[in-house]
């Protein structure tokens, strides 16, 4: 005879209600006399841990505040001429030296204009076989030498640029570059500006004479030659004024 299954020995509705004895009140964590001291130590540890980031924040804030105070103190100190104390020139002196080194390129338009005027002088004083063509070539060289500084000889594009406020006169640009480190009231700059005004006046006068000349009249050709010499002289004086601004 086979043994009965376990499920038949223990009814399904029978559930043990007390397997372990109930805990005594003394075993409760709330009634444990040692528990307050343990909680107090945990509280102290938590407080110590919570103070760490606060202390670090205060230290960081102190470092930042010290840096700001040091920066303010530095900014309020008078500037120290470190460059001069080390024997190194300042930015203005450095720029002046760079302008001197580039003076060859800055003065190139003046030299090119002088060459054009001298070529025109040789043409107008020579006894060519075609006076009309000679005078036409002189006028072409004059326009080239003026560097857009004669308003009535500017082409439409240059005139438009001038009307929109763009400086088109090459000689004015040359002087502006050469005298950029000088004050407006500097005598050297003022004198150079006067020489530029004389040059512009001379170029305009030369243009008027060249356009109102009969190429077959010797007297008229001589007037153009004289005007050319006056313009070359004004150009040389202006060049010297630019050199004075550059201190070369």
Image (cartoon, grey):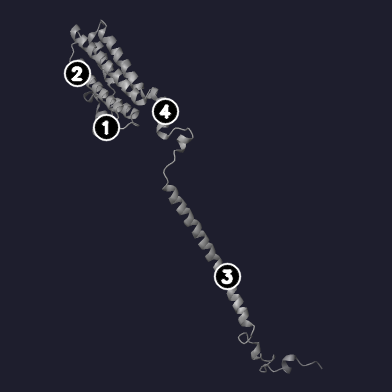
Q: In which quarter of the image is the C terminus?
A: top left
- The answer to whether 162 appears left or right of 87 in the picture is left
Residue 14's spot in the image, x, y percent? 67, 94
Q: Quadrant of the N terminus?
A: bottom right
What crowding class fits label 3: few (fewer than 14 Cα within 10 Å), some (14-19), or many (20 or more)?
A: few
Name the residue at 23% across, 33% down.
163
Which numbered mark, 2 or 3, is in the foreground of this view?
Answer: 3
Q: How far apart are the alpha carbons under marks 1 and 4?
A: 32 Å
What crowding class fits label 1: few (fewer than 14 Cα within 10 Å), some (14-19), or many (20 or more)?
A: few
Residue 217 visible somewhere in the drawing: no
Q: Please tell me which residue lies in front, 89 or 236.
A: 89
- The answer to whether 167 appears left or right of 213 in the picture is right
Residue 139's spot in the image, x, y percent? 25, 16
Snapshot quadrant of residue 197: top left
Q: Please tell me which residue lies in front, 120 or 92.
A: 92
Q: Do the residues labelled 1 and 4 touch (CB within 8 Å)?
A: no
Q: Name the residue under label 2.
A: 208
Q: How far apart are the alpha carbons under marks 3 and 1?
A: 77 Å
What crowding class fits label 2: few (fewer than 14 Cα within 10 Å), some (14-19), or many (20 or more)?
A: some
State whether residue 125 is above or below residue 200.
above
* Helix, strand or loop under label 3: helix
Q: How far apart are the alpha carbons under marks 2 and 3?
A: 97 Å
Task: Please tell me the numbered disc located at residue 228.
Answer: none
Q: Name the residue under label 1.
A: 161
* Helix, strand or loop under label 1: helix
- The answer to whether 245 appears left or right of 208 in the picture is right
Q: How far apart are the alpha carbons under marks 4 and 2?
A: 40 Å
Which numbered mark, 3 or 1, is in the foreground of this view?
Answer: 3
Q: How far apart are the alpha carbons under marks 3 and 4?
A: 66 Å
Q: Which badge, 3 or 4, comes first in the chain's sequence?
A: 3
Name the residue at 66% across, 91% down.
24
């Amino acid at each position: 005879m086979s043994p009965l299954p376990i499920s038949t020995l223990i009814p399904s509705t029978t559930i043990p209600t007390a397997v372990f004895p109930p805990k005594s009140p003394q075993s409760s964590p709330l009634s444990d006399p040692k528990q307050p001291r343990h909680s107090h130590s945990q509280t102290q540890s938590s407080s110590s841990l919570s103070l760490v980031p606060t202390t670090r924040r205060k230290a960081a804030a102190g470092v930042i505040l010290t840096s700001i105070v040091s920066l303010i103190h530095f900014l309020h100190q008078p500037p120290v001429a470190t460059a001069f104390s080390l024997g190194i020139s300042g930015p203005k002196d450095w720029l002046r030296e760079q302008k001197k080194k580039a003076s060859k390129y800055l003065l190139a338009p003046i030299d090119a204009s002088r060459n054009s005027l001298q070529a025109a002088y040789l043409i107008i004083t020579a006894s060519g076989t075609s006076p009309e063509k000679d005078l036409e070539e002189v006028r072409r060289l004059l326009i080239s030498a003026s560097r857009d500084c004669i308003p009535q000889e500017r082409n439409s594009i240059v005139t438009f640029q001038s009307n929109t406020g763009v400086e088109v006169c090459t000689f004015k640009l040359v002087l502006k570059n050469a005298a950029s480190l000088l004050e407006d009231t500097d005598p050297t700059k003022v004198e150079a500006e006067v020489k530029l005004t004389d040059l512009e006046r001379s170029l305009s006068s030369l243009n008027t004479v060249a356009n109102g000349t009969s190429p077959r009249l010797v007297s008229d050709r001589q007037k153009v030659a004289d005007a050319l010499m006056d313009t070359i002289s004004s150009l040389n004086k202006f060049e010297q004024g630019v050199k004075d601004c550059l201190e070369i």
